Structures are given as C-alpha cells and as structure tokens.
Image (cartoon, rainbow, N blue to C red):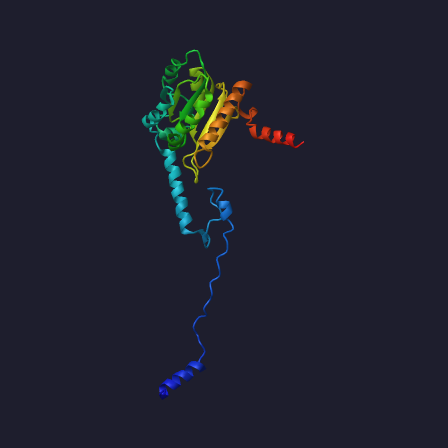
Amino acid sequence: MLNDSTSRETALSYAMPDHRPPTHTPTAPQEEPWAELRALTAARIALPRAGASLATAPQLDLRLAHARARDAVHAQLDEARLIEALAPLGLPVLAVASAAADRQHYLMRPDLGRRLAGDADARLATYAGSGHDLVIVIADGLSARAIEAHARPLLAAALPRLQGWRIAPLVVVRQGRVAIGDEIARALRADIAVVLSGERPGLSAPDSMGAYLTFRPTPQTTDADRNCISNIRPEGLAYADAAVTLTHLLRAMRARQISGVRLKDDRLLRRVSALDERAY
C-alpha cells in the first residue's frame, strides 16, 4: 500500500505538464547531389561552408594545396638525379643552363629563362653533326618536381615509337622556359624541338608536365607556332596516351612541314568521319 507522500507525487505527475524537450526521430541523410560530379574531377565543387566562410576542413586543404604549389615553383631541379634516371633511355644527355643566374632571377625575369647561358650554344654546336630530325629538351620550368617525376616515363613510352628518327642528345636545362628550345634546336641543327617543361602549378596539380612541339623554330617563332600537350601525369593525361599524341603530331609535322595553330590533332575527327561513312 502506497503512503500519502507517494500518492501526492503520483497525482502531481499526472496533473503537471511534461516540459522535457520532444524527442525527434532523425531523418535519413539525403543523397549528396554533387557526389557524381566530384568523382570525375579534382576541382573543388560545392565546398561545405560555416556561415559565410569555408568550413575548417576545406579551408585547411586549400592552404595545403597553395603551399604545395608555391613550393613547386621555388624548388630547384635535382639535375644529377634526373640525368641518372634518363641514362637507361640510351641517348646521350647534355646539361646546360639558361641565362637566369638563380631561381629568383628566373621567376622575375622570364626573358632570361628563354636564352642560353655563356658558351652553352657553342658547346651544343659540337654535337650538331649533319643535323637531326628531333631534339628533346627537358627544362624545369615552373615545376621541377613535374619534370623529375614524369619526363623519363613519358620518353620511355615515346622513344620506341620513333624508330628511324635521327634524335639529338637529350638536353637538360636549369632555369629554362619553353622558348629556350628554339635556341637549342638551332644549335644542334634539329628540325623539330620538343620541350618538356613543368607547368605552372595549380591548386589541384603541383606536378603537371607539358610538352611543347615546334617545327624549325627561328628567332621570330611565337607561341602560335607551337603545339602543346598539357597535364601529363598519372592523374591527368597518362604517359601512354601522351606518347601516342606526341608521336602522332611529330609525324604530322615532318610530313606537312608545319606546327602550331595550322596543325591539328585530327584523329578523333577522322574516326567520327569514318563512323559516319559506315552509317551510310
């Protein structure tokens, strides 16, 4: 039998309203609308926010990516290591420098990175012989890290496809920009210059490499006279695919005696045309 105090508490519990917060059943999370697109690109899409600002995680990730890009621009080329990595390709390797004395001058004076230093022109001329079909220049550009990682694998995939070509010694350039390949091609008497160069780092790719192809460069050559294959790296354009495109353009250059905007990679267009012909 309940005593009087227990009876009063029981009665009050029925008489007083319950002020506890209501219990909410959590709703199932909605499907992420950007997930499918994010799987296709490294671009930063629909980043989460905290009020008017980025959430902490994407903000830290952005700062890390910026630091990596900045480090890539300032990094020095490990020339000895690169030359050692290129040795198994079976071509002589020459090392020269641009007119930029150091990395700071290279970044502040782009014109110096387009010219050879000192007696480099005369040194190269001793290897000219009777001329070459092709010279491959490997310049650190704006990302030495890209060159150290991707130059050898690309050349390993491309050189076997160039059997019968007269290829000059490989030329490694410190503090070099794309146009320095023009001077090197003239010194070695090469018809075509291919310059592998570290591309300007971005927030999603601090190690992207580009290949720039020029037919018979002269002092008047402009960027419109070059063909470019960009974003060569495992996360971008794979080595095997880049090698196929590179050798296709080289053969087209030699056959048509042109490069740049007048020369297009028309393989896809030709495949589409062939499919149209079969359809009819």
* Image x and y of residue 101, in percent: 35, 25
Measured along the vertical axis of the image, is residue 136 above or below residue 199?
above
From where the camera sits, is residue 244 visible?
yes
- Which of the pair 18/86 is nearer the observer? 86
Outermost residue, right direction? Answer: 280
Quarter occupied by residue 74: top left
- Which of the pair 222/123 is nearer the observer? 123
* Image x and y of residue 57, in percent: 40, 50
From where the camera sits, is residue 177 visible?
no
Measured along the vertical axis of the image, is residue 186 above or below residue 22?
above
* Image x and y of residue 37, in percent: 51, 45
x 42%, y 81%: residue: 13
Side of 76 relative to 196 (left or right)? left
Across the whole image, how many numbered discs are drawn on residues? 0
Outermost residue, left direction? Answer: 80
Quarter occupied by residue 200: top left
* Image x and y of residue 268, in percent: 57, 30
x 45%, y 33%: residue: 238
Quarter occupied by residue 176: top left
